[in-house]
């Protein structure tokens, strides 16, 4: 990293609650962020700011506008989400979506599993990775509670089963630590197998009736919760993409706009990233 330059940082789609992608790219650029994580259409029906509907699947003009906005701002499409292995559904159903991600100039796919069976998950992930590689894409499997990869031991098992250099892990800080993993567990991972990191903060104890509600709608500014983020960031691979996944529903419903919600998160995350970089240089 060049001395004096801000640490690279991205913003993930959950942080902006259905914001159309061209506006999202502009927001990231206005905060001097280097990448965004997109989906091909909004997820769910939560839209507190009343954004117009949009679909990158169905709107070629919107795809062209997104690519033009990315070129104009230098904001990269670091990740595309919305891909999941679901029992009984063929993973090949995503072939056209992968074509669209390639057309848009995307780099990486986030793949999740909704199947607790490790063997079925590994087989589906291997097939999906092969489809992605055919299109010049790489894949990161997200650790989480819905599938079989909640622990580092399980993640290592999945990596060994898929056994492809284009397949790595996606580590979400909230999921990782709230599932009981530790800094020592994180240090035990091969850095080359960590493909993407989603950064946020949270208390260690649940605040909501369901975990998914907290994860989808209400996370915290880095440094304001109880996750061991300083130690976590110190262990990150040098070149991994770090992106903010920090939905803040209470502020959105109070009328606070996305830039105002995200700016403190960007400042806090950069402070942590810069501190870790300086510590490594000592």
Image (cartoon, rainbow, N blue to C red):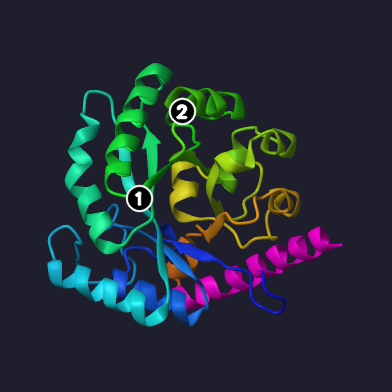
- The quadrant of the rendering that contains the C terminus is bottom right
Residue denoted by label 1: 81
Q: From this viewpoint, is residue 85 visible?
A: no
Left or right, 41 with reference to 140: left
Closer to us: 219 or 83: 83
Closer to us: 74 or 134: 134
Left or right, 63 with reference to 130: left
- The quadrant of the rendering that contains the N terminus is bottom right
Q: Which residues are magenta?
A: 256-282
- For label 2, the SS is loop
| Residue 167 lies within the magenta run | no
Instruction: Identify the residue shown where x is 29% and y is 30%.
Output: 86
Spatial distance from mark 2 to mark 1, Cα to Cα? 22 Å
Instruction: Identify the residue shown where x is 50% and y is 29%.
Output: 159
Instruction: Check contact, mark 2 vs mark 1: CB within 8 A.
Output: no
User: Where is residue 82 shown, x and y percent of the image?
Assistant: 31, 47
Instruction: Identify the residue shown where x is 82% and y is 61%.
Output: 279
Q: Quadrant of residue 267?
A: bottom right
Q: Which mark is residue 163?
A: 2
């Amino acid at each position: 990293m060049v001395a004096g330059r801000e640490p690279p940082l991205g913003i993930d789609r959950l942080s902006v609650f259905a914001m159309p992608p061209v506006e999202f790219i502009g927001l990231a650029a206005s905060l001097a962020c280097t990448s965004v994580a997109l989906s091909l259409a909004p997820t769910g029906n939560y839209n507190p700011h009343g954004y117009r509907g949009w679909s990158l699947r169905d709107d070629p003009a919107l795809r062209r506008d997104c690519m033009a906005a990315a070129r104009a701002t230098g904001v990269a499409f670091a990740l595309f989400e919305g891909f999941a292995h679901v029992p009984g559904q063929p993973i090949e159903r995503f072939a056209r979506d992968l074509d669209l991600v390639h057309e848009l100039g995307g780099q990486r796919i986030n793949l999740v599993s909704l199947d607790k069976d490790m063997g079925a998950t590994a087989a589906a992930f291997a097939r999906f990775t092969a489809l992605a590689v055919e299109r010049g894409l790489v894949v990161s499997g997200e650790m989480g509670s819905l599938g079989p990869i909640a622990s580092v031991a399980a993640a290592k098992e999945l990596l060994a089963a898929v056994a492809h250099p284009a397949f790595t892990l996606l580590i979400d800080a909230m999921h990782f630590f709230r599932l009981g993993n530790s800094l020592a567990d994180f240090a035990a991972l091969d850095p080359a197998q960590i493909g993407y990191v989603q950064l946020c903060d949270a208390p260690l104890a649940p605040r909501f009736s369901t975990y998914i509600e907290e994860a989808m709608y209400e996370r915290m500014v880095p440094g304001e919760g109880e996750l061991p983020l300083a130690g976590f960031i110190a262990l990150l691979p040098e070149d991994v993409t770090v992106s903010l996944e920090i939905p803040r529903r209470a502020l959105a419903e109070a009328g606070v706009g996305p830039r105002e919600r995200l700016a403190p998160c960007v400042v806090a995350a950069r402070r942590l990233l810069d501190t870790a970089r300086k510590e490594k240089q000592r």
